[in-house]
Amino acid sequence: MHLIFVGFMGSGKSTLGKRIASLIGKPFVDMDDRLEEIFGCSISEYIKDFGMESFRQEESELLRILMLEPSSVIATGGGTPCTKGSMEWMRKHGVVVHLSVTPSVLAKRLEGDCAHRPMLADVALNDLERTIGRQLLVRASSYSGADTKWDEEEFDDELLAAKLESIGWRMREVL
């Protein structure tokens, strides 16, 4: 079983995932990094050359492969749970945690990195928060399928321990 983080880009899936993987002694997998290794180029370049539909197919295939590997902590791409059947597949093979962060905080975190984010590359800085808010609304039904939702935007060790304890009965399967 896996511990799987879902949420919008910039929500902290990779940062938090690495911390938790270290705490529980499990390997950490960042799906975006793994896809870039497979592609031999950035996700932005892949999407530019092959399109979003091809990217989502590759992402779904990687998700299925990862779920069959030994237990790990996984940071998905922001859109991974939006592909039909992905959330169900993740829940079947792990505990899914939705990192829910407000559009204003996401905009602040992402404002210097939009050029590398295909969905935000052409968004004007003064429209970033509104664009993120609209995309979150579109993805809300997908993210809501997670086993649990964490609303905190920062995690100290004490809060992190409390959050892990809150899903402890599910975590025992992962550990």
Image (tube, grey):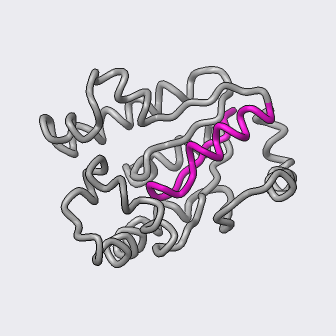
Residue range in magenta is: 1-24
Establish if 18 lies above or below 151: above
Residue 139, horizontal then vertical, whole percent: 41, 65
Establish if 170 lies above or below 126: above
Instruction: Residue at 51% x, 70% y: name it.
Output: 105
Instruction: Residue at 35% x, 53% y: name it.
Output: 113
Residue 42, horizontal then vertical, whole percent: 28, 33
Q: Could you tell me which quadrant the N terminus lies in? A: top right
Q: Is residue 4 magenta?
A: yes
Residue 82, horizontal then vertical, whole percent: 40, 54
Q: Could you tell me which quadrant the C terminus lies in? A: top right
Establish if 57 lies above or below 118: above
**Side (left or right) of 147 relative to 107:** right
Residue 55, horizontal then vertical, whole percent: 26, 38
Name the one closer to the observer, 61 or 24. 24
Residue 174 picture quarter: top right
Q: Is residue 111 magenta?
A: no
**Side (left or right) of 36 relative to 76:** left
